[in-house]
Image (cartoon, rainbow, N blue to C red):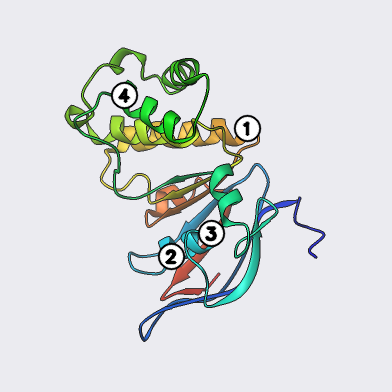
Amino acid sequence: MNTAAPEYVIDVHGLNKHFGDKHVVNDVSLQVARGEIFGFLGPNGSGKATSIRLMCGLLTPDSGTGTCLGYDIRRESAEIKRNVGYMTQRFSYWEDLTIRENLDFVARIYQMRNRREVVDKSLEALGLQSRASQLTGSLSGGWKQRLALAACMLHEPKLLLLDEPTAGVDPTARRDFWEELHRLAARGISVLVSTHYMDEAERCPKLAYIAYGKLLA
């Protein structure tokens, strides 16, 4: 049993994943401490997204062990999913619903009793009240990203896993988004964020560099 589990929100060792004959994640070990913003830097196709999915129990590694929020990544993936906020690179909410309707739908998935209250709080926290009744399909990239972050945070996760969250977003929206991440970290929420932007990597107190599925630094 790993005595450091409470100290680290992510503690994984020797993760490997193949898709066919492609070795996508090659012997990756990583530790992320509580309340820190940890940057996961690497070019497109380097294995960042697959590594993140292995760490939060969405994919099962071919070999390797680890915990996420103290839960075993192989045996307790359902618990991990309940306590983690995961934001994918591709915007995955409903274009023909309003911002409020999207958030309400996510709150229903999590079976929240006080849905209206939770959604109101989320709209306020991310400055979305003025656009709450706007159709999601008409939003700019920056506002969509803000909605995606709000949806991630609805169930008050202790860990955020963000897969290239600012891809295709203008510089001002990117800067605002990073300021929001630092506010969340200040509240004790841990953030693992993957990126291929060097300027974003500089905003992370800790950084790992991955290429061709291998952790290089």
The residue under label 1 is which amino acid type? Ala
Residue name at image x 47 percent, y 32 percent: 179
Task: Give the position of the N terminus as an image quadrant.
Answer: bottom right
Q: CA distance from mark 4 to mark 2?
A: 30 Å
In whole angstroms, how far apart are the C-alphas of marks 1 and 4? 29 Å
Task: Report the side of 210 relative to 197 (left or right).
Answer: right
The answer to whether residue 12 shows anywhere in this view is no
| Alpha carbon separation for disc pair 3 and 1 | 26 Å
Rounded to the nearest whole Å, what is the CA distance between mark 2 and mark 1? 28 Å
Query: Can you give x and y, in whole percent of width and height, for residue 23 in the image?
Result: 42, 81
Q: Which residue is mark 3?
A: 57
Where in the figure is residue 102, as x and y percent of width and height? Answer: 32, 29
In the image, what residue type sits under mark 2? Thr
- The residue that label 4 is drawn on is 101
- Residue under the point 82% across and 59% down: 3
| Circle 4/circle 3 CB separation < 8 Å | no
Up the image or down, 190 lies above or below 97; here it is below
Closest to the observer, 214 or 206: 214
